[in-house]
Each structure stands twice: as structure tokens, then as C-alpha cells.
Image (cartoon, helix red, strand yellow):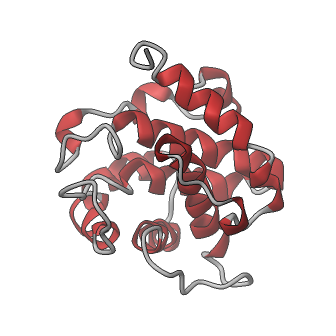
Amino acid sequence: MDTELLSEYGIDGKDFELKQSYFENVSFIHGIKHTERVMTHCLLIGKLIERRYEAFLAFCAAYVHDMGRSGDGYNTVHGRISAEKKLPFFTPLFRKYGVSDKELKYIESAVIQHCVKEWSENGDDDYHVMAILKDADALDRVRINDLNPDMLRYEESNTLIDKAWEMFRADNKDSCG
């Protein structure tokens, strides 16, 4: 992950290193590299829309968002499973960064909503955490050639599409023939 970007947010990258053992399923599509890119996209979106703290909360949500997946296919329950099984394990880490009980609920809501039709609406306290995560996750759909820019919630997210491709290609330069 981009150490300079993490530093701008006051995040120690060592705290958020991902391990395969955190994931229910070994996956190229929804594994460590995908999660790291989504986390980075959260921070980049937050800078662009000037919602840095919501972006940090979305970054925390991105950290656990796919850990509960049992496979790579279409699945609308893995967000809830990730929130139920993984979020409690990482709560002490998030607390280390000052996340309150209320903000943990925002993270939980974002994790659950990332793979279903959202119920949070613009104006709700948790909306930006959820929307940042959903846009960040959507940006990494470049990895499966299925990004629909019309589905992005923030106009600024569209400016990151080339960056999403760049990050994906950099992560896969050795496996792309």
C-alpha cells in the first residue's frame, strides 16, 4: 500500500497488514491485493471529496469487507458474515485509532451494505462511509473488467478509474504475460 498516503492519514501500515488466515476463502479476485486496493481507493476518494475521517472509517470497513466470503461468485450475505465474524476481531485495532461505538456501527453498516442494495441515504450519518466503500470496491471491478462508472456515487470517483487500472496492473505485472 502507498505508505505516503497512509502517513497522510496517520495510519501505520503495519497495523493493517493483511494475512491470508484472516479470510475464509483463498481468492485472487477477493483476496489480499483486492482488499488493499479497495482500502487505498477509500483514502483517495476521501481526499478528493474532503471527507477524510469518513474515508478512514471506510478504510476500516474495506479491511474486513470480503473476509467472510466463502467463494468468488455472486453473494449478498458475505458482507453480513464479514461484519459478524471479522469486525469483532478487529475492533481493538480500530479503537486504537479512536473509533467510537457509533463509528463502529457506521463501519458495520458499510460492510453489510457493500454487497447489497444500500439503505443508507445521502444525509444519513453513515452514508459517506458506506458510499466511499461502495465506490472504492466498485473501482476495483477493473480486475474483472466490470466497472460501470454510472454506478459510482461520487463524481470524483470517476477521476480515479485510470488509477484503479494502474494499481491493478502494478499488482499483476508478473502474471499478465
Who is closer to the viewer here, 128 or 98?
A: 128
**Residue under the image location 52 percent in, 38 percent down:** 37
Answer whether residue 79 is visible to the viewer in this image: yes
Judging depth in this view, the residue of 98 and 31 nearest the camera is: 31
Q: Residue 73, image x and y in percent?
A: 28, 60
* Residue 151 sits in quarter: bottom right
Residue 21, position as x, y percentages in the image: 17, 38
Q: Position of residue 117 (x, y in %)?
A: 50, 81
Question: What residue appears at the point 28 percent right and 52 percent down from the top-left corner?
Answer: 67
Q: Nearer the viewer, residue 1 or 75?
A: 75
Apparent side of residue 13 relative to residue 86 in the rendered image (left or right): right
Does residue 147 appear left or right of residue 160 in this picture? Answer: left
Front one among 144 and 33: 144
Res. 9 in view: no
Residue 33 drawn above or below residue 93: above
Quarter location, residue 155: bottom right
Q: Quadrant of the C terminus?
A: top left
Q: Is residue 153 above or below residue 119?
A: above
